[in-house]
Amino acid sequence: MSDTQNDKQQGKTETKLSRREVLKMAGVGGVSLLLGSVVGGSVLEGSGLTSALTGSSDTKKAGGSQASIPFYDTVQAGIVTPSQDFLCFASFDLVVNRIEDVRKLFREWTEAAAQMAAGQPVGEESSNAFLPPKDTGEAAGLLPARTTITFGVGPSFFDERLGLQAKRPASFKVLPKFPGDSLLEEWCGGDIGVQVCANDLQVAFHAIRNLTRIARGKAVLRWMQEGFQRTGAANPAGETPRNLLGFKDGTGNPNVNDRELMNSHVWVQPSDGPSWMENGSYMVTRRIRMRIEVWDRSSLQDQETTFGRHRASGAPLGEQGEFDPLALDKKDENGKLAIPAMSHVRLSHGDGSVKILRRSYSYSSGMDLKSGQFDAGLFFVSYQRNIATQFVPLQERLAKQDKLNEYIVHVGSAVFACFPGAKKGGYIGEGLLS
């Protein structure tokens, strides 16, 4: 008997159960019965959860690009998880002042997020024709699509409303204004940030929509941004994605499979404090609009000296391979630095001691009705262990000197303290809210 036949007899094909199948089964016996019958088959549990987050083993075996990624673990999924094809990011503002209401919200969000990450509908379906369905339904029949849902809270979460002022991490605050910033209120801040990534945009939107519905009366949307990159189908080799300026974006990222490196630069450690953030990470989002029309009129040479990399290969100027080390002292035949002093890659690298984990997506919001130009660019997302000592000095350097500033403008900004992961039976943010 083949492994596949054996698995079918043992009921191990659950990872490919679609939401439509789940809804049908729920109509007969309720989702609780369904969960009881298949949890052991790994719809929720999987094995080696942390390794699944990095896509190193189980995720790929379970069904590739449409598989489920376990929600419960020591750390939240969606940080070191290999980037999915699409992003839906939502910033929420609280409309309640009682911490017990916020605690209830995170309990409900946790349960819903775990269900949606597993490719299941939210709540038990009801046949009562006089009540709204609990799940909004647009993801029925769709696979999990490697959905991850990552939660964090902004500095405003720690104001006087909830009485959590004393629990705010000392260095966690709104970013300073950088030179060249042209921030718009409608793209800044928020009490709570939720990053949903998936290999299907409708699945990702479904998650944000249901979380928004569940939050009714407790929190409201402040702003929302969708994002995209090349899909796995369009680039099976999984090469570094390109941004809308045509250059590879993320080449310099640290190796997410290097646990020591992640502990040094991404995950909050016990010595950092506070304890409720241990195994969490701090997120920065920046909505960066690109002046695409101007960029498209610049020469290839100007584009490459702006980035400090060759456009075709992604290699540092003067080198051959995308991942070749930066030869910062190397000079060309004219005695000039091969990688210009004001190039993006040189300034981003600095002395090499500060690293952040970028997880950005391109965005397009159609046409700017005032200018007639593209409203498109990069929704920058980065994770780091400490924003004040990692992102801020890096961005100060870029804001003052980066040649790329001729072609971009930062219009949105927010920071969020992303909680550690949750255990089954617990909820996201429990260490802070309990």
Image (cartoon, rainbow, N blue to C red):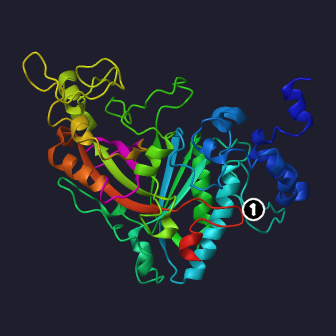
- Is residue 321 in sight in this rendering? yes
- What percent of the width, then of the height, locates residue 163? 46, 84
Nearest to the observer: residue 263 or residue 384: 263
Q: Which residues are magenta?
A: 362-390
- What percent of the width, then of the height, locates residue 315? 31, 23
Q: Which quadrant holds the N terminus?
A: top right
Q: Is residue 395 above or below residue 343?
A: below
- What percent of the width, then of the height, locates residue 421? 59, 59
Magenta stretch holds residue 381: yes
* Left-right relation of 380 to 228: left
Which residue shows up at 37% across the image and 47% down it? 356
Number of numbered discs on residues = 1
Image quadrant in which you'd find residue 401: top left
Magenta stretch holds residue 347: no
* Left-right relation of 208 to 70: left
Image quadrant in which you'd find residue 34: bottom right
Q: Is residue 169 above or below residue 20?
A: below
Nearest to the observer: residue 273 or residue 67: 273
Which residue shows up at 26% across the image and 49% down it? 394
- Which residue, given by chain and number where applicable, does mark 1 sit on? 123
Nearest to the observer: residue 326 or residue 134: 326
Query: Tag 1, which secondary structure?
Result: loop
Nearest to the observer: residue 140 or residue 371: 140
